[in-house]
Image (cartoon, helix red, strand yellow):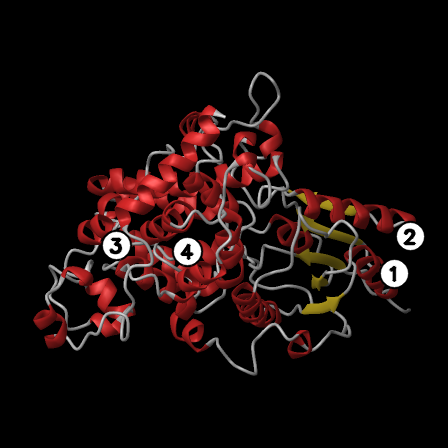
């Protein structure tokens, strides 16, 4: 007698490139049928059009390639596979499900408008061929639809938002990764190299390879190492770019190599084990909460990357200055802390969070350049470029966003450098032409005497630029511009 083979279950991976705490994979593994993982590079679905969606930036594409290789290896080690396909998700998934006779297609929800629209298209395409869909919550701590004010709108101020999240109570425990999956039939897959996610000519990703190890295993190690050590002192140390005091988890969270729920529970456990670090861990969790806040904003405002949350900013007198923008992008503004941050970004695909605020403030306030120009540059160069956090943080700095910084807060890049990089170690690492300048001068080299500059091998205007704008003049110009929209 011939035994009919079990129909496989397809798991559609998106921004959740992990095996642990993956509800859709957990469901598929519990079925006892072959499991086939699928990742689709979808740049064709009609809902995937600006301004609500845009293709990944260059640094994020590099990360995605590494993360997919890691996920492929993890699934293969458990007896399954990861099929790579390119095209419109609804057509690809329905076609694949039909061809292999899939029992079900399962995936985790992503609470962003374009992602949900594409998912709805997938549901309809599968319904048309009689294959059921199963959708699970998985990318946030709380579904944005469940966190509304009395008017039915999402919260726009962080503190009450985070209090509401905390009041919900303990989150469900993360799901364990399956140790073994029933073997899946061979299915044709694209060659990852054919997607050309990684740069070749020129290959500018050397600094990224030196800095990062994408994948679920690395994410878990980073979280464990951070909570076992560096979290002590995090509340204050997180502002010091000259120290290794942060978790470095943001790109892993961005690609779902670790879930917010896993971070939450690990941090709660660490706080119970280390009472002396409880305050630092609460601060760390509030940063996770800020990520959540930004994603909830995006849920309500899908075009967050192009539209001012505060409409009064639609009349803001932004300047158009290509040379100034390029000087900022290249780290040649003449302000060492700003230039160090921009060069760190170019080399590593990341930037310390305190420095992100400083360089963003410098662009929109000292230079009066549109926050959207800075956001677009970060989108292309950050490995952790997130559709919620990136525009929400830029709007926060500009003053046009939710819970925004006061308009009169213009970060002084000199004082910021002196306070948070007091010995100049961060600047020396990323602006080596200032290496030999005394610590008291390194954040304002233009105040050094000719003898001091000569001794440090610096020629202002040649080996290192003069400030692109004087701090006092830049601040006064910014305040005048902000005053126009406040009174106009």
Query: Cβ–Cβ below 8 Å for labels 3 and 1?
Result: no
Query: Where is mark 4, residue-wise?
Result: 249
Query: Where is mark 3, residue-wise?
Result: 230
Which of disc 1 and disc 2 is earlier in sequence?
1
Query: Cβ–Cβ below 8 Å for labels 3 and 2?
Result: no
Of circles 4 and 2, which is in front?
4
Query: Where is mark 1, residue-wise?
Result: 98
Of circles 3 and 1, which is in front?
3
Query: Cβ–Cβ below 8 Å for labels 1 and 4?
Result: no
* CA distance for labels 3 and 2: 52 Å
Query: Cβ–Cβ below 8 Å for labels 2 and 1?
Result: yes
Which of disc 2 and disc 3 is earlier in sequence?
2
Q: Position of residue 327 (x, y in %)?
A: 40, 63
As helix, strand or loop, the secondary structure at mark 4 comes to loop
Q: Position of residue 228 (x, y in %)?
A: 27, 54
Picture quarter with the N terminus = bottom right
As helix, strand or loop, the secondary structure at mark 2 comes to loop
Please name the residue shown 11% across and 70% down the image: 450
Extreme residue toward the left, this view: 451
Query: Cβ–Cβ below 8 Å for labels 3 and 4?
Result: no
Query: Where is mark 2, residue-wise?
Result: 129
Which of disc 1 and disc 3 is earlier in sequence?
1
* CA distance for labels 3 and 4: 13 Å
Q: Position of residue 301 (x, y in %)?
A: 61, 36
Density class for disc 3 (Cα within 10 Å; few <14, some 14-19, many ≥20) is: some
Extreme residue toward the bottom, this view: 201
In the picture, residue 486 is in which quadrant?
top left
* CA distance for labels 3 and 1: 50 Å
* CA distance for labels 1 and 4: 38 Å
């Amino acid at each position: 007698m011939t035994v009919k083979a079990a129909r496989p279950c397809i798991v559609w991976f998106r921004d959740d490139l992990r095996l642990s705490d993956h509800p859709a994979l957990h469901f598929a593994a519990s079925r006892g049928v072959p499991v086939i993982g699928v990742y689709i590079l979808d740049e064709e679905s009609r809902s995937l059009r600006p301004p609500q969606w845009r293709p990944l930036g260059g640094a994020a594409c590099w990360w995605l390639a590494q993360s997919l290789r890691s996920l492929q290896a993890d699934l293969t080690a458990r007896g399954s596979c990861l099929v790579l396909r390119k095209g419109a998700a609804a057509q690809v998934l329905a076609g694949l499900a039909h061809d292999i006779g899939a029992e079900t297609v399962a995936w985790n929800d992503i609470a962003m408008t374009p992602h949900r629209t594409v998912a709805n298209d997938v549901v309809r395409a599968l319904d048309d061929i009689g294959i059921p869909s199963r959708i699970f919550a998985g990318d946030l701590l709380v579904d944005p639809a469940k966190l509304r004010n009395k008017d039915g709108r999402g919260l726009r101020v962080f503190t009450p938002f985070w209090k509401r999240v905390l009041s919900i109570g303990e989150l469900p425990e993360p799901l364990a990764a399956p140790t073994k999956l029933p073997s899946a039939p061979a299915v044709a897959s694209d060659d990852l190299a054919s997607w050309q996610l990684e740069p070749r000519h020129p290959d500018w990703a050397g600094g990224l390879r030196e800095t990062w190890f994408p994948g679920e295993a690395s994410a878990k190690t980073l979280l464990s190492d951070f909570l076992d050590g560096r979290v002590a002192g995090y509340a204050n140390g997180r502002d010091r770019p000259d120290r290794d005091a942060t978790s470095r988890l943001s790109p892993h969270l961005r690609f779902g190599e670790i879930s917010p729920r896993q971070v939450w529970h690990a941090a709660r456990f660490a706080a119970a084990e280390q009472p002396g670090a409880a305050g630092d861990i609460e601060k760390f969790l509030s940063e996770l909460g800020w990520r959540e806040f930004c994603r909830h904003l995006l849920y309500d405002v899908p075009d967050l990357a192009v539209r001012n949350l505060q409409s009064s900013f639609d009349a803001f007198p932004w300047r158009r200055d290509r040379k100034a923008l390029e000087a900022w992008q290249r780290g040649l503004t003449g302000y060492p802390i700003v230039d160090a941050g921009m060069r760190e970004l170019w080399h590593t695909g990341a930037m310390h969070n305190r420095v992100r605020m400083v360089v963003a403030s410098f662009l929109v306030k000292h230079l009066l350049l549109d926050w959207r120009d800075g956001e677009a540059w970060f989108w292309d160069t950050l490995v952790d470029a997130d559709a919620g956090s990136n525009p929400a943080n830029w709007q926060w700095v500009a003053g046009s966003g939710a819970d925004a910084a006061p308009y009169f807060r213009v970060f002084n890049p000199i004082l910021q450098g002196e306070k948070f990089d007091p010995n100049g170690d961060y600047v020396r690492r990323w602006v080596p032409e200032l290496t030999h300048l005394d610590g008291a001068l390194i954040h304002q080299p233009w105040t050094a005497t000719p003898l001091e500059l000569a001794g440090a091998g610096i020629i202002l205007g040649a080996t290192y630029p003069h400030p692109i704008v004087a701090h006092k003049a830049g601040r006064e110009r910014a305040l005048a511009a902000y005053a126009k929209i406040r009174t106009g």
